[in-house]
Amino acid sequence: MKKLVAYITSAFPNKDFTVDLALSLKESGVDMLELGIPFSDPVADGAKIEMANHLALKKGFKFSDTLEITSKISDSIDTFWMGYFNSFYQKGIESITKKAKELNLKGFIIPDLPFEETKEYQDIFDRYDIANITFVAPTDSNERIQLLVRDAKEFIYMVAYAGITGSQKQEDIKPFIDSIKRYTDTPVYVGFGVNKDTAKQKAKNSDGVIVGSAFIDILLKDELSNAQKIKECAELARVIKSEINS
């Protein structure tokens, strides 16, 4: 069974909504959750997630909101914090990693923390058994792929192309996935540009997909009530889970 990972933005539009949405997504087939930490300059994200970040910050988002949300969902669904390194660094890497362990978090997803710089913090991550998710991109050589995935935990984030999330760009990713699987048994999930129309194709040779912008697009629809947003996200999750496993 191929896995579905969903990204949603913490406290957008509010904390209670995020908790309700996360639990609904779990019931609708989502296997893992990326809980986004709003940041002022989310360089790896497209316009939709950037807007959600901006609106959450405008409403007064605090890191403690993510902690509170996590405490209410992490026992029900495997949860990862997706954010930019400054958000973690400001809290102190060891302090926040220890707190993550206390909250039963599975790992961190930090797109702007280069692999080489991760080594400085790897002992801390290992001490608290918190995975730091590995990114692999089409621009990586076979030699670098082997290095990147050697100690990968939980899953490998396969960037479907060189760019930002939410793009509709299409590439043949099978050769890249084959290269990754040559060196590791860790599951490979494909992210960037995954929606209900592309999920089946992107999941073809992978172990699952990561969907973010497609969910955030629903959350940005002002004409929908919060209940309607959760309903539409749940239906989207069911459709994508079915598509990737058909």
Image (spheres, rainbow, N blue to C red):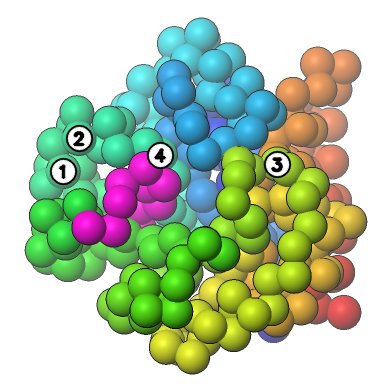
Determine which of the numbered discs, if any, sits on residue 93 in the image. Answer: 1
The residue segment tinted magenta is 105-116
Residue 115 appears at what percent x and percent y? 29, 58
> In the shown orientation, is residue 173 left or right of residue 65?
right
Residue 172 appears at what percent x and percent y? 75, 70
Q: Nearer the viewer, residue 154 or 202?
A: 202
Q: CA distance from mark 1 to mark 3?
A: 29 Å
Q: Earlier in the sequence, mark 2 or mark 3?
A: 2
Q: Amino acid at mark 4?
A: Gly
Q: Secondary structure at mark 3?
A: loop
Q: CA distance from mark 2 to mark 4?
A: 11 Å
Q: CA distance from mark 4 to mark 1?
A: 13 Å
Determine which of the numbered discs, if any, sits on residue 83 in the image. Answer: 4
Residue in the picture at 72% in, 50% down = 193
Question: Residues at badges 2 and 4 in contact (C-beta under 8 Å)?
Answer: no
Q: Residue beneath label 3, please? A: 166
Q: Amino acid at mark 1?
A: Ile
Q: Secondary structure at mark 2?
A: helix
Q: Quadrant of residue 122?
A: bottom left
Q: Is residue 107 above or below residue 17?
A: below
Q: Quadrant of residue 167?
A: top right
Question: Residues at badges 2 and 3 in contact (C-beta under 8 Å)?
Answer: no
Determine which of the numbered discs, if any, sits on residue 80 in the image. Answer: none
Determine which of the numbered discs, if any, sits on residue 89 in the image. Answer: 2
Q: Amino acid at mark 3?
A: Gly
Question: Residues at badges 1 and 2 in contact (C-beta under 8 Å)?
Answer: yes
Q: Check the picture and name the quadrant holding the C terminus.
A: bottom right
Residue in the picture at 20% in, 35% down = 89
Q: CA distance from mark 2 to mark 3?
A: 27 Å
Q: Earlier in the sequence, mark 4 or mark 1?
A: 4
